Image: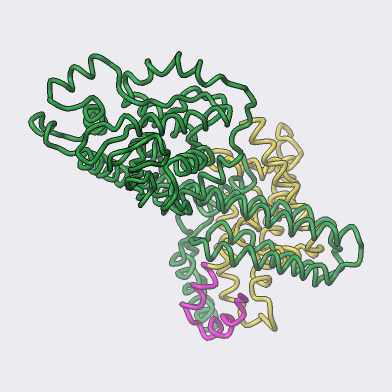
Chain colours: A yellow, B green
Amino acid sequence: MTLDHLAPKIIRRDEKAFAELYERTRRIVYSVCLSILKNRAVAEELSQDTFVAVWERIDEFRGNGLKLWVLTIAKHKALNELRRRKREVAVDFFENETIGGEYVIETQVEEGLLLSVALERLNEVDRQIVLMKNSGAKTKEIAEFLQMPRGTVSWRYAEALKVLRNYVEVEG
Amino acid sequence: MKKRSIERQLKKEIESASPSDFSAVFARCEKSTVAQTEEVLVGAGGEEVRSPRRKTKLTALILAGFLFLSLAVGFLIGGIRGAFDSKLKFSQGYFLLDINPSVEVAYNEEGIVTSAVGLNDDGKALLVGLALTDKSYQEAADMLFERCYAMGYFARGREDNAMLVTALSEDGEKDKAMTDAIRSALANSFIKNKLCGVVITGVSDPALEENAKNYGINAQKYGLILSYLALGGALEEERYASVSVRELYALIDGKEQELKAAKIAENELILNKFERELHETLSEQIEGLLDTMGVYLSDEKTAQQEKLEALQENAAALENVQTQTERKQLIDEIILQLEGLKAGETDAQVLAMIDNAKISVSVLYNFFEKAFILLKKESATPEQICKIRLWKFASYGDGAEDVGFEEWQALYEESVAKRWYEMKEAWRKARKQDF
């Protein structure tokens, strides 16, 4: 079911409608941020930022596809954050040569074995597909978001799950 | 780890990790709104509020072991009176065949069966669809034997195939002529079916006989009392002599029902878990089929991909169905949707693949449906039990060993007969293994 009907209500500052949008998209928004940044704490913060941005910029939403619009905001925020962090690492590198020059993506392994494995073992696109799919996104939505054919999304999802399964079975 | 388990675990982990504090978000939104207003008025900004991470506590459900309760005591009580054979005469009464099911078969003086009633669930199941009335005792014994065999109470390669035969006249005295006649008929059935089998015609354990004598009852009845006590029943010794055989069977049956009810309640959670797992497996199997098929459907055909997605949703929904009707509806819909996929394809191989998928879904459904029925055995009707057992055992075993019944009988009868109630315990165990 589309969420577009919530947009006019949110424009009128309807908290209930915004809460519904939040509840129905928070997992996918978090997944998008996490799959790009691979850092849970930052992904969590950016998820909040995304919803604040949605609240602030809802007037700009036109037409249909509210969920996709929200996810796009999340994606842009995550990519901006990634770029910002890369710049910071680069600055650190020039200031202190003992620090490695590569931007090291932090992966937290303390909880959520499969999530950690997904973050570690899958490439960015497969990561996004797996995380979004298991956050409740439909294949069609993922395909639109990633701008790839649905069949490809399905196939990549199945392959990515095989990778996870193999890893879990071998590493146990 | 199954695909479904991985997905479930991932969902759980994402749910646990993703922020869910809407109030914190909304507080920031409100501040932002105020700040925007103030910016317009005085140019001030707002402080950010960060939400604490939501900690989801997961409760693990630990399920203990699962036991199938099997009904053990069984018997066939039949009555045949009169001359089924011109040379033999019977007193009116009933004979008792103790296999596992409990069935009372009444007979008239002519040796013709006048009624057959299942006294417990297994007995009722045994009689489903069996028209014994108006049959001769021989025909009835044959039919009962065949049904027992078909329902898995006897099997080739097993050495505990056994039946206890006791014929009693109405006054409770043994009817030896009838006992021998039934024994002979059943013994032939064992031989005919090449089964190791024993037909026990009496209790020959001297100790049992002696104990029985002390109570003023026959050993057969004493054996029944012991069976009842073995099930946890209580019966004062003073009543041993006065309690009737029929009453004993009723007591045993009541005790079994009681135990069964307790076991059903105890197993409810575990049954639910099994059912859920079956649903998950069914759903996963069909999704696997669809995944494979999805690779061959063209990406360019948007309509096809949409249909496939709808199919995948239905396959996933199978995991959460609650009733057989829902399950059937979803499967029907999936098969219809698969048929619908054919409309968008021209490649003969893809079309054949879709047809194969339809067949596979049907086969899977039928297989799982049987498993669901089996799972529900504890609360099944006699008709369902009959169906389950026939489904499971109708192959009549696969051994081809030619067994000399008489020899086997000579070797084992006495030892088995000594403690026929113990043998019934062995039957209980054997039946547990059956399922």
Residue B393 location in percent, x, y?
Answer: 56, 40
Relative horizontal placement of residue B398, taking residue B71 as reference (left or right): right
Quadrant for the N terminus of chain B, please.
top right
Q: Quadrant of residue B417?
A: top left
| A38 in the magenta segment | no
Is A59 located above or below residue B200 in the figure? below
Q: Residue at x 64, y 42 (%)?
A: A106
Is B326 located above or below residue B151 in the figure? below
Residue B362 location in percent, x, y?
Answer: 68, 57
Magenta: main secondary structure equals helix
Q: Residue at x 65, y 68 (%)?
A: B333
Question: In the rendered structure, which segment of residues is drawn in magenta?
Answer: A1-23
Q: Quadrant of residue A53?
A: bottom right
Q: Residue at x 92, y 63 (%)?
A: B347
How many circles with numbers are drawn on the protein?
0
Which residue occupies the extreme front position in the image? B86
Viewer-nearest residue: A113 or B379 = B379
Viewer-nearest residue: B355 or B222 = B222
Relative horizontal placement of residue B28, taking residue B87 as reference (left or right): right
Which residue occupies the extreme left position in the image? B238
Viewer-nearest residue: B7 or A15 = B7
Residue B184 visible, this orientation = yes
Relative horizontal placement of residue B304, taking residue B191 as reference (left or right): right
